[in-house]
Image (tube, rainbow, N blue to C red):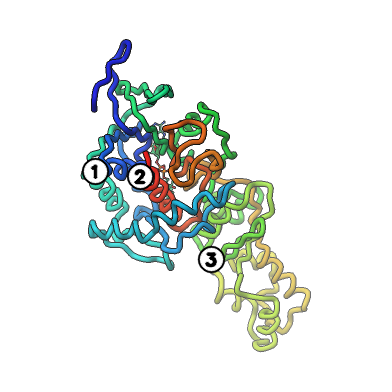
Amino acid sequence: MQPLIGDEVVVDKVDVIVIGAGASGLMCAATAAYRGKKVLLLDHANKAGKKILMSGGGRCNFTNMDAAPKHFLSDNPYFCISALNRFSPQDFVDLVDRHGLEYVEKTPGQLFCEHSAKDILAILLTELDWSGAELKLNTKVHDIEFQDKQTVLKTSQGEFACESLVVATGGLSIPTMGATGLGYDIAKQVGHSLLPTRASLVPITVQPDRKGQLAALSGIACDVSATANGVTFQEPMLFTHRGVSGPAILQITNFWQPGEALSINISPTLSLKDLFDIRQNTPKKSYEGILSALLPKRLVELIKVDFPWLTERSAQTSNEQVECLFQYLANFDISPNGTEGYRTAEVTLGGVNTNEVSSKTFESQKQTGLYFIGEVLDVTGWLGGYNFQWAWASGYCAGLHV
Ligand code: FDA
């Protein structure tokens, strides 16, 4: 870095400073440095890419080959299109292929490391090293001053000046992993508006009077369809000690919030007609036996508390009873009362208003030389590797322009 003599202090000057050595910041810093820019990547944490390491159950679901704008939520749904086109899932796969990463496709399109999320972080740190960008950890940003031709940062490791400042500080989820609201504060400092933030891709907690009953099911999973605000996901749901989780629940929290209607169907493949046909075709069989083939045993035991007649031959049941059972299954009562919040959420909905940021360069329309990338922006993906794809794509595109 080149020292710049200011009025009182010696300031290190670089072309680009990126705040946040997470997924998008690592990608942006390396991309810019490969273009010959002098890049300084700062993070207050003692390690880069902590969320990458804990992602995908430790195996990082690093992209989704089907990633398309429809998998992202934003006040401006068109904002993500350009970057997703310019840096596609295949581009990221090409990168990891060059490093010989072994990976697996779990559900169609969802790519995970074969061994460990550490492999993805190692690739990004190798690229950072090869690009010549400098990484400074344990660096707290105290103050940012936007001057005419440069921006000056006062940090716990000294003062730095740059022509371009990239904010890659992510969202608010998992504060113990280093999440802070610094990116939102910087946005507000230059007059950006923010879309309301809330924890998402997060487990749902249940009301105290239902919690005891459902806690007895803790650890079991079943396929459900979860519907809120007209959106439905058919995926597994997991009962936990405090409520419900699993892919179907995490997905629906992008579309549901406490106080709104949420419908859980625990036998989404079974219609009312199916239930009547079963009675017609196998009159000697009990509905308990029929449900046991579809649902975990402990869940059937819970249903029997409300429907003791399940043990009887189906021929002995009335139409009304069967209809009642169908309604119970199709609208299973989980009595949601909230979410686990930022403590365990995978992402933050909302953030820096994308109507005030260039979708091509990621430069702020409020402050020349200031850029926002990744999750700090009001762009949130579904569960399934989409959020990392957004981090790579936005980081890469900004890296080409800073
Ligand atoms: P990211 O959070 O990665 O990085 C932000 C960086 O900024 C951090 O290094 C932080 O320390 C730093 N920072 C914050 N405040 C700062 C400050 N004041 N000063 C300096 N530095 C500061 N997505 C996906 O696609 N597939 C998956 O498998 C998973 N799995 C997953 C599991 C869990 C448990 C979580 C919490 C999240 C996921 N995600 C995911 C989501 C994914 O991790 C997330 O969307 C991206 O990491 C966002 O990338 P960013 O670069 O925007 O922020």
- The answer to whether mark 1 is within 8 Å of ligand 1 is no
Quarter residue 227 falls in: bottom right
Taking the image as drawn, is residue 61 in sight? Answer: no
Q: Quadrant of residue 125?
A: top left
Circle 2/circle 1 CB separation < 8 Å: no
Question: SS for tag 2?
Answer: loop
Q: Residue at x 40, y 39 (%)?
A: 177
Q: Determine contact: label 3, label 2, CB under 8 Å.
A: no
Q: Residues within 10 Å of mark 2 (few under 14, many from 20)?
A: some
Is 57 placed left or right of 186 in the picture? Answer: left
Name the residue type under label 1. Answer: Ser
Q: Nearer the viewer, residue 110 or 30?
A: 30
Residue named by callout 3: 222
| For residue 274, side relative to residue 60 (left or right) | right
Q: Amino acid at mark 2?
A: Leu
* Viewport quadrant of the C terminus: top left
Residue type, numbered disc 3: Cys
- Is 302 placed above or below 215 here? below
x 32%, y 21%: residue: 159
What residue is shown with label 2? 400
